[in-house]
Amino acid sequence: MACTALSLSFARGADIRKVFLSMPDSIMPMLTANDRLDFLDFMDSGMKAKVSNRLGGESVMTDLSGTSLTVRTSQSSSTCIAVYENRRGRMLICLITTVTADFPDSSVKFYNEDWTPAQASKIIRFPELRDFLESDALKNDSLPLLEEQSVLRLKVATATPDALEFRYTSLDYIGEDAGKYIRWFKPDGLTYRWNGRKFVR
């Protein structure tokens, strides 16, 4: 998955490294400040960036760019941190935590550049089931049945340099009728572009 305090003000083109190192321990409690430093050192050296985390397992940094990074925190979870510049030249931090049980499910949180929480409702309207459906499906008489059967509505989120992408992952929870609903869903998922103030479809 491509994605991505020392109290400081971020200049234009803020380095994801500074964001990662300034992150409060409470955001990723299984990693210490030294673990985060080790990740960056390993990546710079071309080595596998893995550390033993506080839970006794192994965490691995799998991606690092100028504006995002991804850490596989355990065998069943990963965290992506990405930064987006707003119209005032300051940074919005996006943190995506994805848990994979039978199917992946992501939670998305936002922070200001000092790692204080930002109000998600002012930044994005998260997609609902109907957003993932083709226009013909919205007119189908069987739509209420799909909504009733799709009790678990899981989605996976991916950060790109200028957008957030969402893909619906709950079809198999619908049961034996899942096959007939596949064609109802948009094959490429949903893309929300960053406009310097919020993410919009």
Image (tube, rainbow, N blue to C red):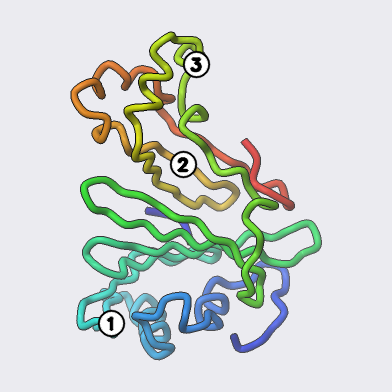
Q: Amino acid at mark 2?
A: Phe
Q: Residues within 10 Å of mark 3 (few under 14, many from 20)?
A: some
Q: Mark 1 or mark 3, which is nearer the start of the sequence?
A: 1
Q: Residue 123's x, y, as percent?
A: 66, 52
* In this rendering, position of residue 12 left or right of residue 94: right
Q: Residue at x 66, y 72 (%)?
A: 113
User: What whole-number distance in Å separates the C-alpha atoms at marks 2 and 3?
Assistant: 19 Å
User: What whole-number distance in Å separates the C-alpha atoms at marks 3 and 1?
Assistant: 46 Å
Please tell me whether mark 3 sits on a helix, a strand or a loop: helix
Q: Amino acid at mark 3?
A: Leu
Q: Amino acid at mark 1?
A: Asn
Task: Determine contact: label 2, label 3, CB under 8 Å.
Answer: no
Label ID, residue 166? 2
Q: Mark 3 or mark 2, which is nearer the start of the sequence?
A: 3
Q: Residue 38's x, y, as percent?
A: 36, 85
Label 3 sits on residue: 138
Q: Quadrant of residue 89?
A: bottom right
Q: Residue at x 66, y 87 (%)?
A: 7
- Observer-nearest residue: 16 or 165? 165
15 vs 120: above or below: below
Q: Mark 2 or mark 1, which is nearer the start of the sequence?
A: 1
Q: Residue 81's x, y, as percent?
A: 49, 65
Label 1 sits on residue: 53
1 vs 55: above or below: above
Please tell me whether mark 1 sits on a helix, a strand or a loop: loop
Q: Quadrant of the C terminus?
A: top right
Q: Residues within 10 Å of mark 2 (few under 14, many from 20)?
A: some
